[in-house]
């Protein structure tokens, strides 16, 4: 009896954590999650040292802020163009192109110390100043995962997708921190040389990601239009005989096709068309997109004010933390943030996606505002860790909410537009932080970021409470049709 109870408990735990969902997912889904781990590993490593590297080159705080903003502006242009044409030109091709740009940026940062050359590489390539997503990857991967996953397991898949990304960031930060300390202990290795070595690893990881994108199958591409059927109320014997004889004459040598639904006949075949390069977005989805874009812009501007690069720079300048200790600190916070995604998936199954997004994100906004207030290290670290406990718990529910709110054919374009809006809003934040840091008012940036994020959570709850997704509306229509 005890053995049965233990197996039941283990099955319940695996179901709650989404392990059955991710283990039973397709090979392509697993490859997409692995790609995200590799990419965020590279982002975590570069983010830990980006502001410090630029500072060691003699660049002022204000120009560092300008650099981060211009990086995000470049990402807006590149991401918008690539995601807009991704479904028409091929998702795998766009992901491979983005990986090549990532490799090129890493090589430039490895061999150049000129400010404007680095700016150009960050604008036209892929360099993340925040340890978060940048480039076209996220929108395309989320759209593809939505296509590959059924609605009942989609939140679990997104939770693991987010968890592995956060785990990649954590591993990248701790490996980078301690590797830099070890390199600087060697003869003739300065901090700048060690930082450039990390960017060389960044370029190598871009090649790894390129290989993983090449391994994806055709199932990742947009689905072809489904065969449409016309409802038939009644056919006489002559019509039935005509249809059957026509089918026998024309399809004798053809391979068998799936049977159509009962009481239906196929509509006349239409000329085969290529997938349109430019996507179309329905009026209902445009309304949802507008509301979400407005809300996400506030949250993203706040994220730009307190990027991971600025937070690492804050702890280094205020508390003189070495890179190894800094990497360990952010490894801990990233691992906590990663594990919290599994809890978020379980919560969303009980209270819904929207409430999970708001009630988990609001505490992290408050802790973010409190980080600069202590005058000693350990209370500031405590607030940073407490913030990490819930800061990413809204990500998987938000991805699942957005995927369910629009039509499957619109997901890549909608998610691309949302990411562009978020990045564009985020780009103004580093400028403000750089200006405040140059005036020795770094702490004000954290207060502004926390207040904006809290306002975003409350506005999200007010504007979208009671909202029904496309899938929920379609499900209700099907139930009403069956009842009729």
Image (cartoon, grey):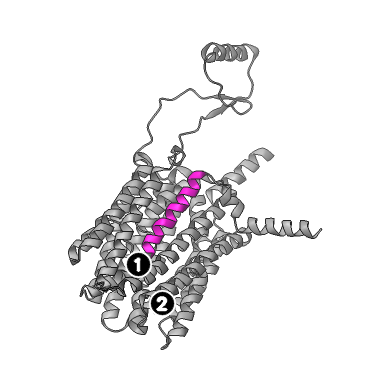
State the residue lying farthest toward the bottom. 375
Could you tell me which quadrant the C terminus lies in? top right
Residue 138's x, y, as percent?
Answer: 41, 54
Q: Residues within 10 Å of mark 1 (few under 14, many from 20)?
A: many
Of 274 and 293, the residue lying toward us? 274
Residue 82's x, y, as percent?
Answer: 32, 48
Residue 47 numbered mark, or none: 1
Residue 400 numbered mark, or none: none
Q: Main secondary structure of the magenta part?
A: helix
Q: Badge 2 is on which residue? A: 325
> Please, what secondary structure does the residue beneath circle 1 have?
helix
Residue 332's x, y, as percent?
Answer: 48, 72
Number of labelled discs?
A: 2
State the residue lying farthest toward the front. 187
Residue drawn where x is 34% and y is 46% of the image: 96
User: Of tags 1 and 2, which is closer to the observer?
Assistant: 2
Magenta-drawn stretch contains 38: yes
> Please, what secondary structure does the residue beneath circle 2 have?
helix
Tell me the magenta residue range.
Answer: 27-44
Residue 234's x, y, as percent?
Answer: 64, 21
What is the quadrant of residue 224 in the picture?
top left
Of 475 and 439, the residue lying toward us? 439
Q: Is residue 441 visible?
A: yes
Q: Earlier in the sequence, mark 1 or mark 2?
A: 1
Magenta-drawn stretch contains 301: no
What is the quadrant of residue 445 in the picture?
bottom left
Q: CA distance from mark 1 to mark 2?
A: 15 Å
């Amino acid at each position: 009896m005890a053995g049965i109870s233990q197996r039941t408990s283990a099955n319940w735990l695996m179901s709650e954590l989404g392990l059955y969902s991710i283990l039973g997912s397709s090979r392509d889904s697993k490859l997409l999650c692995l790609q995200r781990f590799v990419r965020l590993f590279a982002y975590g490593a570069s983010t830990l040292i980006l502001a410090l590297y630029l500072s060691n080159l003699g660049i002022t705080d204000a120009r560092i802020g300008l650099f981060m903003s211009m990086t995000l502006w470049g990402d807006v242009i590149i991401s918008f163009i690539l995601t807009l044409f991704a479904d028409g030109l091929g998702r795998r091709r766009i992901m491979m192109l983005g990986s090549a740009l990532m490799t090129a940026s890493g090589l430039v940062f490895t061999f150049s110390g000129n400010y404007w050359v680095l700016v150009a590489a960050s604008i036209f390539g892929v360099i993340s100043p925040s340890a978060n997503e940048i480039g076209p990857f996220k929108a395309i991967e989320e759209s593809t995962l939505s296509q590959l996953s059924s609605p009942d397991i989609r939140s679990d898949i997104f939770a693991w997708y987010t968890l592995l990304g956060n785990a990649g960031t954590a591993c990248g930060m701790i490996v980078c921190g301690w590797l830099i300390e070890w390199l600087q202990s060697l003869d003739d290795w300065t901090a700048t040389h060690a930082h450039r070595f990390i960017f060389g690893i960044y370029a190598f990881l871009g090649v790894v990601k390129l290989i993983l994108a090449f391994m994806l199958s055709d199932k990742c591409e947009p689905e072809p239009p489904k065969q449409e059927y016309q409802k038939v109320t009644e056919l006489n014997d002559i019509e039935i005989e005509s249809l059957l004889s026509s089918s026998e004459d024309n399809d004798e040598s053809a391979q068998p096709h799936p049977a159509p639904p009962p009481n239906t006949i196929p509509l006349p075949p239409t000329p085969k068309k290529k997938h349109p390069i430019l996507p179309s977005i329905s009026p209902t989805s445009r309304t949802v997109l507008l509301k979400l874009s407005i809300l996400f812009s506030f949250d993203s501007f706040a994220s730009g004010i307190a990027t991971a690069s600025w937070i690492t720079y804050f702890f280094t300048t205020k508390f003189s933390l070495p890179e190894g200790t800094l990497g360990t600190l952010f490894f801990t916070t990233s691992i906590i943030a990663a594990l919290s995604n599994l809890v978020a998936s379980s919560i969303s199954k009980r209270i819904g996606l929207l409430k999970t997004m708001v009630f988990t994100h609001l505490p992290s906004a408050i802790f973010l505002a409190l980080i600069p207030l202590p005058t000693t290290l350990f209370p500031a670290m405590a607030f940073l860790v407490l913030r990490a406990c819930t800061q990413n718990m809204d990500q998987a529910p938000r991805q699942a909410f957005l995927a369910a709110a629009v039509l499957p054919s619109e997901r890549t374009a909608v998610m691309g537009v949302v990411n562009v809006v978020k990045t564009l809003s985020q780009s103004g934040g580093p400028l403000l932080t750089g200006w405040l840091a140059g005036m020795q008012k770094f702490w004000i940036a954290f207060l502004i970021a926390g207040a904006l994020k809290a306002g975003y959570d409350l506005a999200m709850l007010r504007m979208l409470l009671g909202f029904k997704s496309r899938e929920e509306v379609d499900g209700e229509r099907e139930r009403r049709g069956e009842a009729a």
